[in-house]
Amino acid sequence: MTTSATPTHCPYCALQCGMNLTPVPGGGVEVSERVDFPVNRGALCGKGRTAPVLLSSRLRLTSPLVRNAGVLEPASWDEALARITEGLSRTRTDHGPDACGVFGGGGLTNEKAYALGKFARVVLGTSQIDYNGRFCMSSAAAAGIRAFGLDRGLPFPLEDIPRTGCVILVGSNLAETMPPALRYLTELKANGGTLIVIDPRRTRTAEQADLHLAPRPGTDLALALGLLHLVVAEGRTDEAYIRERTSGWEEARAAAMAHWPEYVERITGVSVPRLREAVRLFCAPKDAMVLTARGPEQQSKGTDTVGAWINLCLATGRSGRPLSGYGCLTGQGNGQGGREHGQKADQLPGYRKLTDPAARRHVAEVWGVDPDSLPGPGRSAYELLDAMGTEIRSLLLMGSNPVVSAPRAAHIEQRLKSLDFLAVADVVLSETAALADVVLPVTQWAEETGTTTNLEGRVLLRRRAVTPPDGVRSDLHVLHELAARLGVEKGFPTDPEEVFDELRRASAGGPADYSGITYRRLAEGDGVFWPCPAPGTAEGSEGSEGSEGSEASEASEDDSPVRDRSVQ
């Protein structure tokens, strides 16, 4: 174990704050500030400062567990891997490959997310793979792809926020969920900018606002349409921008004009004068932003709601230019990268669509398989979990605890119990792992090297700082061993850099192109923004502004998004 400080990143939220880790003589790890990293500039929240506690916790799993006579008992790695191989093989033989499910998580590194998607499609031949990120910002991702053609949390770095003229923050309490990011809002105000917070509660973040709108819960869509109505009625639209760079304006305008101020006041509880004040503050400066989070997304019409906020930006010409635009505050640590490279049921690495023949050919060539052997899109996360015990008979789960985190958790617990076979790889014996037939103890953030992608689309290198406990192995090792036992002896390396190099090739030319990013570049700087093609591929550069999109869903009759042709 090294005794020098290792520069790395916090494992928790999508800020991926920079920190230094130093092993302490006698055991334990000390966290210190890493002031050179631009996202948090040394600031850490309580979670970040206490993140190393779990590294030495007595709750850690250090031996595989297998279920005998209904009881989980310690076992060797060979026995545990053999049990998983047998369980998955039996399911494929008796019920077909799609009876095998794979479920991942938004906390897995890019390398592990990539390898898990490849394992599902190449080794198991199943279409049934998804991950817990579906429970997070799927609504924003769906709205983003419909408006911009790409799912991107923020299409600009956080450092742009203090330089704009006005920010509308919808359904986010940064002061408590991402404390190091609050400084960007305080700096915005210090620079003369205006902060509008939309939240039913008067949170610590709302207390910082120049204007706090508190709509009734679930009425965010009406509020957004009401603000757009006032933008139109008061002549604040950017007609040239709408004409030259968007489509669908007439439909969006009609939806907004059906939400006149008094009607919106009755629905939302926000008074007409405050609605007018919000429009005035948003439209007064040259540049402005709208940032959404889980509040407007976690609603029955979350995609429509986010789409309406995007329309507010487009109708006022605030998109596709510096210091203006729409952004989504991604939540999980690698929620962005976790869905870019193959965990989602309908995507291949690089945000390639699984239904696109050219995408299938490209990825299949990298993987050394026939494109026709790749399964099509499968069930999304909740549908996958809901099908357990019926269409899906076995499940391999990594980096998630759906007994706690999934919608209708009690129902999902019963579905998990109805499986023929369940294997879980985790750090501790979680509520879900306690139901498994086999549990594998795996490494966690500071015990392994890998990349993550933060909410800005900034790809980062998270370095191994400590040695894992005896008996613990990495998820990449697990997939390597299982692939070999299931007949695929090559293509699943255990070295994360080797996996990343393959990920680069698989993503090359795709919307989320990582081909120009290397471990060396990441080690020498503060991360690299995607898209970053290698020389000779599609246009792009380090630090380039991204677009948005990737999770399609059907539009409701209420939804009429403006489409920004300029950023496709």
Image: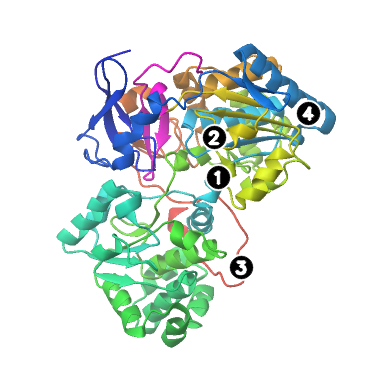
Label annotation for residue 221: none
| Numbered range of the magenta stretch | 445-473
Q: Amino acid at mark 1?
A: Val
Q: Which mark is residue 92?
A: 4
10 Å crowding of disc 3: few (<14), some (14-19), many (20+):
few
Q: Residues within 10 Å of mark 4 (few under 14, many from 20)?
A: some
What is the x, y in percent for residue 106?
Answer: 49, 39
Q: Give the alpha-carbon distance from disc 3 to disc 1, as whole Å.
A: 30 Å
**Which amino acid type corresponds to the residue marked 4 in the rendered image?**
Arg
Of 338 and 362, the residue lying toward us: 338
Please give the name of the residue rendered at 52% of the width and 41% of the height, measured from the top-left corner.
339
* Label whose residue precedes the other's in the sequence (4 or 2): 4
Q: Which residue is mark 2?
A: 430
Q: Are marks 1 and 2 in contact (CB under 8 Å)?
A: yes
- Residue that lies at the very extreme toward the right in this rendered image: 94
Examine the rendered structure and indicate whether residue 440 appears above or below residue 265. Answer: above
User: What's the residue at 38%, 74% (across, down)?
Assistant: 239
**Label 1: which residue?**
404
Work out whether residue 377 can be spotted: no
Between residues 191 and 212, which one lies in front from this camera angle?
A: 212
Give the secondary structure at mark 1.
Answer: helix
Q: Amino acid at mark 2?
A: Ser
Q: What's the CA distance linking mark 4 and mark 2?
A: 27 Å
Q: Which residue is located at x 48 percent, y 80 percent? A: 267
Q: Nearer the viewer, residue 185 or 393?
A: 393
Q: Amino acid at mark 3?
A: Ser
